Image: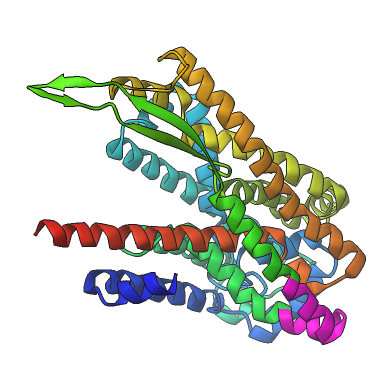
Amino acid sequence: MLKAISNALHIPELRKKILITIGILALYRFGAYLPIPGIPFAAMLEAYQNASSSSSALAVLNLFSGGALSRMSVFSLGIMPYITSQIILQMLQAVIPSLGELGREGEAGQRKITQYTRYLTVALALISAIGYLFLFKSDAYGLDFSAMGVPEALENVIVISVLLTGALIIMWLGEVITQYGIGNGMSLIIFANIMAALPTAIISSVLTSGGVWMTVLTLLVIAAVVPVIVYIERGQRRIPVQYAKRVVGRRMMGGQSTYLPIKVNTAGVVPIIFASALLYLPAQIAVFFPNVGWMQAFGNAVSSGWINWLLSILLIVFFAYFYTSMVMNPEETADQLRKSGGFIPGVRPGKATAAYIKATLDHVTLPGAVFMAVIAVVPSIIFVFTSNSLIESFGGTSILIMVDVAMDTIASLEGQLKMHNYEGFFK
């Protein structure tokens, strides 16, 4: 990893991409500390502490915003409107044939899907901004925006506009990283949120949750889990593929043997992010209605406890299968093999090959999905018995996301290094 980064820094083009990525992430973290105009900082912190003491759902929202919600910054909406839009669009592709065809049309189709995702993000961010305005003015928060010195109607417009603009800026920052930087922009923003919360979580653990030794023990356990996650992430099942010999001109071509790699965790960290985003929605709706008792109870139940654990497991397993089927479609893979003259020994080309690949995918995906679900849920169960704030803030979901995003980013960097080396070879 360090060697790849060192080599990349010696190449001007890759060095520029790395600096763009770091610069965008730094700009994002700056925005997370930039407050909504018209609210004193002390009043913000006091209002959040009072509200979060009676709502675990609010703590979930703050975690996903990277702490921006507790500071009531311009980035309080966080990245969730964009991720929720992606979930909706990907599900619609599976049930609406025209959208599914659009997604398979290559780069032009993906540009259209991205455009629809942006439109939906604007709509969801606007709804969320209106909800947050009512939340900030509710009895739970009790914030007063009179310091703006404008009529109340204009206050509302300003706050909604600031929150909406912040969400759209986050979307733009993520896309800039994806296009001009290294790795996936949205994943790296989530990575930055988790890393930003780590120092505070460690300090809080030392001061309030068992002292130095418990904190050190927790960090050692986390360090021991990381290699296991890496091992599972790199695990794959290799399906042997044989290519038929054919005559091209006067030469005999083909006949070589290779394999079709199927990863244990083909979907990567997407199932966890999507599952967390869906569980985040009831929490978000609940905090918008602080005076409705049953809605608060529902939001808190979904945000923590055995209901949250059960739903997390079910959603992670579901999205693992759902996203794997989108990333690696058995019918399309079998068709590509047939067109290129490849076949799986002992399996007839066509439908039989597609069925064989699907069965293999199903068998391989299950242990990977269960592993992700266990890693995501077990730390939350441990927290119930230990009350260790480090486990609460930096649990299994955070570890999985960080490891997976780090591995994907390094893989992207190494891929661009190889491309650069090939370009140098052909020049």
Is residue 133 visible in the rendered image? The answer is: no
x, y (%) of residue 19?
A: 34, 75
Q: In the orientation shown, which residue stands out farthest toward the right?
A: 385
In the picture, residue 41 is in which quadrant? Answer: bottom right
Q: Residue at x 56, y 47 (%)?
A: 235
On the rendered structure, is 275 left or right of 216?
A: left
Is residue 60 visible in the rendered image? The answer is: yes
**Residue in front for this viewpoint, 312 or 93:** 312
**The N terminus, quarter of image:** bottom left
Q: Is residue 255 magenta?
A: no
In the picture, residue 76 is in which quadrant? Answer: bottom right
x, y (%) of residue 371?
A: 70, 47
303 in relation to 260, above or below: below
**Residue in front for this viewpoint, 191 or 213:** 213
On the rendered structure, is 20 left or right of 217?
A: left
Q: Residue at x 60, y 55 (%)?
A: 231
Query: What's the magenta bit mostly, secondary-structure-wise?
Result: helix
**Residue in front for this viewpoint, 167 or 398:** 398
Instruction: Give, as a single range, the part of the protein colored magenta.
Output: 202-220
153 in relation to 346, above or below: below
x, y (%) of residue 397?
A: 68, 58
Q: Is residue 215 magenta?
A: yes
